[in-house]
Amino acid sequence: MTFSRIAGTGSYLPEKILTNKDLEQMVDTTDEWIVTRTGIKQRHIAATDEFTSDLAYHASINAIASAKINPEDIDLIIVATTTPDLTFPSTACLLQEKLGINKCPAFDIQAVCSGFVYALTTADNFIKTGSAKCVLVVGADTMSRITDYTDRSNCILWGDGAGAVILQASIEPGMLSSHIHADGRHAKLLCVPSGVSKKDSKSTISMEGNAVFKMAVKTLDAIVDETLNANGMQKSDINWLVPHQANIRILQATAKKLHMDMDRVVVTVDKHGNTSAASIPLALDCAVRDGRINRGDNVLMEAFGGGFTWGSVLIRY
Ligand code: COA
């Protein structure tokens, strides 16, 4: 049987930092309110001439170097993003061109903040069925481009960034299981009401924060049970939680569910804010590079986002 395993990780954050103090000058808010309610202290913002594919490119180069492969070894590119450079071609195709490779298939996945979990699940299935051997999986978003910086109810949350992994065929797991879900009935609670086919006067994020918060906690609670049951594992078998970085209080709720101390949870929300599809691979790369996550560790990644979509991936790193 063929499994897939992460051979290397990479990430990239734009240079410009937007602090809570900066936001105090833009909307009626305070650093104290933002830190208490969200755990966020700062976020990175892409330059005006920097696009999602550029962020994805830098993260990919770092992942390729970390996996010690050549770009030509990649036989599939999947980019999870809600903020593509263009309506088409896909950001994955633009990334492929930037990487100087032109033979492999490339496509985008849209599952908002769950995008990376969806993309990793898709890549795993390509590998398991023998359709691919070396997949570049990227989560990249420029959320600042769809943020209304006059709306204090959610402009304080979002940041820009990208994370990437190289997923390779392996005789040992690797990816132990993945679980993805969606429920379109709640679309209006978290959305951008305008798009390509349907125009609306509002083309920035609209969110009922409190309802989203409650749903996220409940759903992530259930996905922890689903993942552990599928693998016959106990809570204590999980070495690291690498959650989607939406709000420190949501992270704390999932850690509590796992009876896990917060020092086993990889937290980047304070420095990155919510970077949507980029947040999990960014956090994973941070914890791999600083030596917290090591080969053989059981790592649980989970996400919840617009759609609603949600999911988890359990890996033995
Ligand atoms: N600064 C200061 N006050 C603010 C504020 C801000 N940036 N935003 C809202 N407020 C005020 C509200 O007006 C409200 O005031 P009121 O009590 O006088 O009416 C009060 O703070 C509480 O607002 P509420 O929306 O209930 O706060 P909250 O505790 O739910 O926190 C979020 C708001 C957005 C931080 C929180 O709901 C959240 O994180 N939700 C999940 C969002 C998320 O993760 N989305 C992405 C999923 S991938």
Image (cartoon, rainbow, N blue to C red):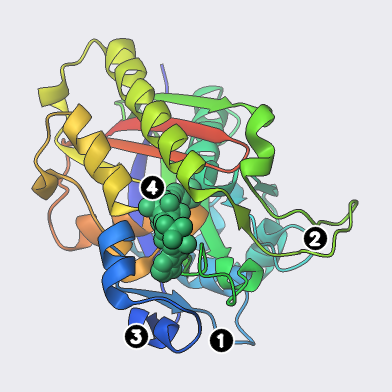
Q: Residue shown at 59%/43% (left/top)? A: 306
Question: In the rendered structure, which amino acid carries the disc numbered 1?
Answer: Ala
Which residue corresponds to mark 2? 89
Q: Earlier in the sequence, mark 2 or mark 4?
A: 2
Q: Earlier in the sequence, mark 3 or mark 1?
A: 3
Q: Earlier in the sequence, mark 3 or mark 2?
A: 3
Marks 1 and 2: which is nearer the front? 1
Marks 4 and 3 sit apart, C-alpha to C-alpha, by 24 Å
- Left or right of 258? Residue 188 is right
The quarter of the image holding the N terminus is: top left
Q: Earlier in the sequence, mark 1 or mark 4?
A: 1
Question: In the rendered structure, which amino acid carries the disc numbered 3?
Answer: Lys
Question: In the rendered structure, which amino acid carries the disc numbered 2?
Answer: Pro
Q: Position of residue 129 (x, y in %)?
A: 56, 22
Helix, strand or loop at mark 1: loop
**Residue 15 appearing in the image:** no
| Callout 1 touching callout 4 (CB < 8 Å) | no
Q: Earlier in the sequence, mark 4 or mark 3?
A: 3
> Mark 4 near ligand 1 (CB under 8 Å)?
yes
Which residue corresponds to mark 1? 47
Marks 3 and 2: which is nearer the front? 3
Q: Return the residue found at the far front.
A: 28
Quadrant position of residue 52: bottom right
